[in-house]
Amino acid sequence: MSEPILIAKDVCLSFGGVFAADHIHFELHEGERLAVIGQNGAGKTTFINICTGYLKPDAGQILFNGKDITAKTPRDIVRLGMGRSFQLPQLFVDHSVQQCLEIAAAARSGKLSWLTPLSQSVSHSEVLETMELVGLRDKAGELSGSLPEGHKKLLDVAMALMLQPKLIIMDEPTSGVSSEDKHGLMALIMQALDERKVTSWFVEHDVDIVSKYATRVAAWISGQIAADGAPSDVLSNPQIKKEVLGDMTC
Amino acid sequence: MRFGLISLVLAAAMMAIGVLFPWMKTIGILGLCYGLAALGVSLPARSGQVSFGHAMFACVAAYAVAFTAKAFPQLDGLMLIVWSVGLSTAFCAVLGLFMVRYRGIFFGMLNLAVSMVIVALLGKLYSLTGGTDGIRVDRPTFFGFVTERNEFETLLLGFTLLVSMGCGWFYQRFIHSASGEALSGLKTNETRLEYLGLSAHKVLWVGYVISGVFLSLSGAIFALAQGLVTPDMGSWMRSGEFVFIMILGGASHALGAFVGAGIFEVVKLAASAYMAGVWQLLLGVTLLVVIVVAPDGIIGALEKKKENKQGEQA
């Protein structure tokens, strides 16, 4: 097995009496496609927020590529190579699709120009290639805020991809997207991630999507990882079927 | 490009009018100072942060001119401007470290609060500042020339036009650069900015300091043109006028601030001539009409019209 890219050691975080992360031990390896499942309130997004620096844990340690990132800010963690997309796409809604990606490309260099036009301060071919990769080339000039939800999700992922991350964490990439468009959306995202050889971790509620695109599944229950392993094993686990997937026959 | 050409034509026309009608020179210089100040207010406004205290930077620069001219009467006007703008910008840079931590109404009101402290100090420390009477600024040499009032104003008008065009050019380059686009990105999504590895504070701070440079230039030139500095220059009323002008002209193009300043001056003059008792009423109605009819300001509306036309042709 490849080296772990992300390690969580005994991570705890509680809000009042509620444990959102309850002594979590977790490792993510390079090349994996991890799907995280769990009911609302199970602590999936909280754990993402801890790993991406948005929340600080009460105890425990997070290592990314061997570096301790527990106390680092989202900005620092992004610079170390961890990209993120959001349940509600975080876009610059008054900018066009192309401009959003150009800002992301300029941000990667860490030095923003003052006089050179944005479009000339980044690699045009790279921006075009990324738009092509996520199927937004023909939307280049459209305002990102006016895109349909599925395209917004794609752009959100594409902006994270422009940073050339080693790991991308996607919080519910298919939520808000119609069921007939979900598979097309995930296929596009996964194809883009494969081409860039990016390790991924995504939160998902749709079992079909999880079965098809994940190489590993971790199920969250009450701030703990209740099951972690191959998709077929986790999804057939009676406890997971009952408490996470809502199968009343178990 | 079209607006750039219009700017050049307007600048040439303004210089010609100043030469033909000398009494127009001071009005022109002061109008341009208002435009420069509104241009400065436009930068943080592009990130969604409207300051109601930015006139303090013009005021600090103006008092720096007055104090320095008093201490070193032989100093050239150009040196006075450079020195006072540097000083005021340094003040802006330090204050900005604190201000960029706040957003929305807090950003606006904290700027207002600091400006009120400065105005109060300038008004109360009478022995130092001359209180509300202010400090006279004697006419200095300008670019080494010892001049009479008329020549001085001609030189100052030409200089102010050049500075305004330079600042306008810089503004246009800046707002379309990576820094400028990140600044306007802050208005719609600060979270994403941070998750792109950028510091939202730093992005706003850069915009804040550049805006401080524009305001400082405006204040320093204003002090030389008027020959008198008073605490009123930093009052909340003055800051409000700068915001008014920015809304009137629009922040999407540098020309907006100067067109807004021109209209503001004309409306103010017309109102005081024909509606002396209720001149604020006319200003208020003008602002209301602009907000309803052209929420992006006059230049913003013209730009939109141009874009629509291009869209139809395409």
Image (cartoon, coloured by chain):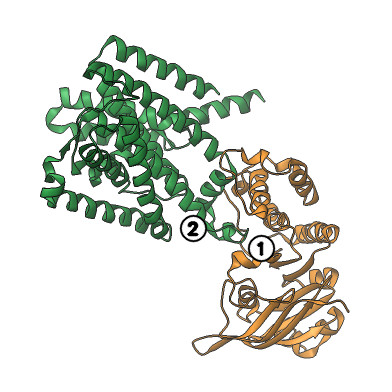
Chain colours: A orange, B green
Q: Is residue B299 visible?
A: no
Q: Nearer the viewer, residue A148 or A10?
A: A10
Q: Secondary structure at mark 2?
A: helix
The chain to which mark 2 is attached is B
Residue at numbered disc 2: B201
Q: Which mark is residue A79?
A: 1
Residue at the image position 77 percent from the left and 68 percent from the top: A200
Q: Residues within 10 Å of mark 2 (few under 14, many from 20)?
A: some
Q: Along the horizontal axis of the image, is B300 left or right of A203?
A: left
Q: Is residue B251 visible?
A: yes
The chain to which mark 1 is attached is A
Residue at the image position 66 percent from the left and 63 percent from the top: A79
Q: Quadrant of the N terminus of chain B?
A: top right
2 and 1 marks on the same chain: no
Q: Residues within 10 Å of mark 1 (few under 14, many from 20)?
A: many
Q: Along the horizontal axis of the image, is B192 left or right of B283?
A: right
What is the C-alpha distance between the residues marked 2 and 1? 17 Å
Q: Along the horizontal axis of the image, is A194 left or right of B54?
A: right
Amino acid on which the number 2 mark rests in the picture? His
B87 versus B114 height, above or below? above
Residue at the image position 30 percent from the left and 18 percent from the top: B154
In the rendered image, residue A25, in percent from the top left (x then y), is placed at: 71, 87
Q: Along the horizontal axis of the image, is A34 left or right of B263?
A: right
